[in-house]
Image: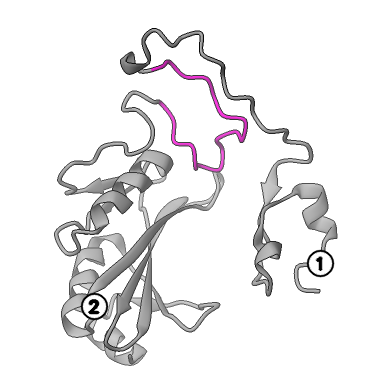
Amino acid sequence: MDSSKIISELGFLKPRKSADSALAFDCPPEHLVKAAKTLRDSHDCRSLQDIAAIDMGPDSSPRFGAVYHFYSHSKKKYVRLVCMCADSARPALPSLCGVFKGADWNEREAYDLMGITFEGHPSLRRIMMWESYPWHPLRKDFPLSGRDAPLPDTFADNENATKVVPAPEEGGPFHSPSTATIFASQREPRSADTAASAPENP
């Protein structure tokens, strides 16, 4: 799969560095649907493998976005698109459900846990938390210990059930390494004090 050929067809894409062998591009949100259709129809990327929502942190602008991984079974190649939301207060991206039916649950998960609205989704509902839940638990400013919230009506007669005891947060907040690491164990989030003293690549 040729990066220059993809860019010649989709001039709005900008190549980005990749830690693996996958072709990677930044894609403006207004061109996401066109890029997905072109990868599917012209480059045989018939599978949308996943959509990973990202939060760059409360002080970043743009803050929210999504990483899309497309795969060509015939060419055995991945293509990665990174698409950032224009508005951090009301993050939104176009839905790819009309191009890849498998985008349905991935977009619902990103909406539920990160608060990104996917415009044009046929039924954008929460997929893990209940509909009236007021927060998005994967955002970086959501506390690891969680937050108490009003329970849904389906929880009636269980008000006295034992609550989950939050895990200890000694040493938090937690951070992942900012550079590529060799071993999977080194990619696990560490508390700020140990992350600063531990080598990322021994």
Quarter location, residue 185:
bottom right
- x, y (%) of residue 34? 19, 70
Three-letter amino acid code of the residue under disc 1: Pro
- x, y (%) of residue 199? 81, 67
Q: Which residue is mark 1?
A: 199
Q: Is residue 89 visible?
A: no
- x, y (%) of residue 192? 76, 48
- Mark 1 neighbour density, 10 Å: few (under 14) some (14–19) many (20 or more): few
SS for tag 2?
Answer: helix
Q: Is residue 90 magenta?
A: no
In the drawing, does residue 165 fall left or right of residue 135? Answer: right
In the image, residue 67 above or below residue 53: below
Quarter location, residue 74:
bottom left
Q: Which residue is mark 2?
A: 39
Between residue 152 and residue 121, name the one nearer to us.
152
N-terminal label among 1 and 2: 2
SS for tag 1?
Answer: loop
Start and end of the magenta stretch? 134-151
Between residue 161 and residue 102, name the one nearer to us.
161
